[in-house]
């Protein structure tokens, strides 16, 4: 929960969305960064989906799965004799979620998942991922809400391997078109003054950043400018310290177009520059060491396809 995919405007629905408003959905994304200037070419693919197991509006069980493939076209050495970045890295995960409505604008639930993020998935217990989240929401005033949660992940970009509680308060003003959700360890905000413009931003911990300005270009076609920083982490099989994670950190500035493709499909295409690119090993992405393998800026191309099958459960006013 609350990984870098917190913002609701992300094309692939994040764990927070799957908890608060589960629906049948699927998403595929593809990212390519051409090589050059001594840097490897990078391709990153991800496929994830959610399936509702029950249709009861007050009690909902859901199952989710995710598969990711991160590939380099040439070897990359890690600093201080730590070996090399594997040519191919995987993210595999499956989980089960529960959402229980408790009257008007009040709910609780949770999600547990197991998986492996590694060059050798499930090779041993050292390459396994475990995540668990429990949450409770309650209304405040006419349209605001509180969110309380308890989270654990042994492969998180923030407090990896440490169970921690969190909270957030959501201010919603639908008529004015804005919403702000602030708490620990994240803050997000959105503002839509009219049907043509939308502005969104979020911050998770010290490293997860999303910002976007969107403008309707023609009919349902929308153009946008985005800035993102979403570090990736893996449990490399041959790492020297079991506590270390292999981290790929970069920043992106992109221009893109998105539009519906039929009744249930959305298409998103974008291009821009990836910079401050680097590999390193540390406890998590928020503890970047001085020794790291860095690369020059490069162009980046992205494509995403999202499908929604069925309506989301009622809003709990915590988003």
Image (tube, rainbow, N blue to C red):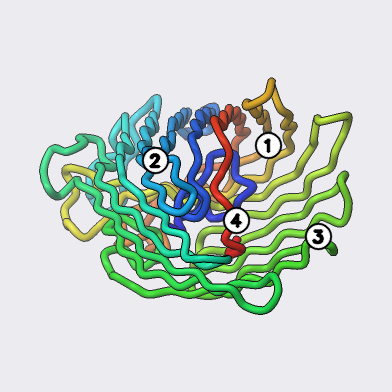
Along the line of sight, the residue nearer the viewer: 186 or 55: 55
Q: Is 173 placed above or below 304 here?
A: below
Query: Gap between marks 2 and 3, in whole Å?
Result: 33 Å
Query: Gap between marks 3 and 4, in whole Å?
Result: 16 Å
Left or right of residue 127, residue 27 in this image: right
Crowd tier of the residue under label 4, counting other residues whose Cα lies within 10 Å: few below 14, some 14–19, many 20 or above: few
Q: Is 164 placed above or below 294 here?
A: below
Whichever of callouts 1 and 3 sits on the residue coming sooner in the sequence is 3
- The label nearer to you, 3 versus 4, is 4
> Most extreme residue toward the top, as rendered?
262
Q: Is 82 placed above or below 64 here?
A: below
Say the numbered circle drawn on residue 54. Answer: 2
Whichever of callouts 1 and 4 sits on the residue coming sooner in the sequence is 1
Along the line of sight, the residue nearer the viewer: 151 or 156: 151
Whichever of callouts 4 and 2 sits on the residue coming sooner in the sequence is 2
Query: Gap between marks 1 and 2, in whole Å?
Result: 41 Å
> Most extreme residue toward the left, as rendered?
124
Say the numbered circle drawn on residue 177. Answer: 3
Query: Gap between marks 1 and 4, in whole Å?
Result: 34 Å
Mark 2 touches mark 3? (CB < 8 Å): no
- Residue at image mark 4: 315
- The label nearer to you, 1 versus 3, is 3
Q: Where, by quadrant of the figure, is residue 11 drawn?
A: top right
């Amino acid at each position: 929960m609350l990984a870098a995919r917190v913002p609701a405007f992300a094309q692939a629905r994040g764990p927070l969305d799957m908890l608060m408003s589960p629906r049948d959905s699927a998403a595929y994304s593809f990212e390519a960064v051409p090589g050059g200037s001594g840097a490897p070419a990078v391709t990153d693919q991800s496929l994830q989906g959610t399936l509702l197991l029950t249709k009861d509006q007050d009690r909902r069980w859901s199952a989710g799965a995710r598969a990711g493939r991160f590939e380099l076209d040439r070897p990359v050495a890690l600093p201080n004799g730590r070996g090399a970045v594997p040519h191919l890295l995987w993210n595999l995960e499956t989980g089960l979620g529960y959402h229980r409505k408790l009257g008007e604008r009040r709910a609780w639930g949770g999600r547990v998942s197991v998986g492996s993020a590694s060059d050798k998935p499930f090779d041993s217990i050292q390459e396994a991922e475990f995540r668990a989240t429990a949450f409770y929401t309650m209304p405040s005033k006419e349209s605001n809400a509180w969110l309380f949660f308890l989270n654990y992940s042994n492969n998180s970009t923030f407090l990896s391997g440490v169970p921690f509680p969190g909270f957030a308060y959501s201010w919603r003003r639908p008529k004015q078109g804005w919403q702000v959700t602030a708490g620990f360890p994240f803050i997000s905000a959105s503002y839509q003054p009219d049907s043509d413009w939308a502005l969104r931003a979020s911050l998770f911990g010290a490293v997860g950043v999303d910002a976007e300005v969107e403008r309707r270009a023609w009919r349902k076609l929308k153009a946008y400018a985005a800035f993102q920083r979403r570090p990736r982490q893996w449990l490399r099989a041959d790492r020297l310290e079991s506590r270390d994670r292999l981290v790929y950190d970069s920043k992106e500035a992109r221009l893109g177009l998105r539009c519906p493709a039929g009744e249930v499909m959305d298409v998103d295409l974008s291009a821009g520059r990836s910079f401050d690119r680097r590999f390193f090993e540390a406890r998590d992405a928020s503890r970047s060491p001085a020794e790291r393998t860095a690369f020059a800026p490069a162009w980046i191309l992205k494509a995403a396809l999202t499908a929604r099958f069925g309506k989301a459960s009622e809003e709990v006013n915590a988003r």
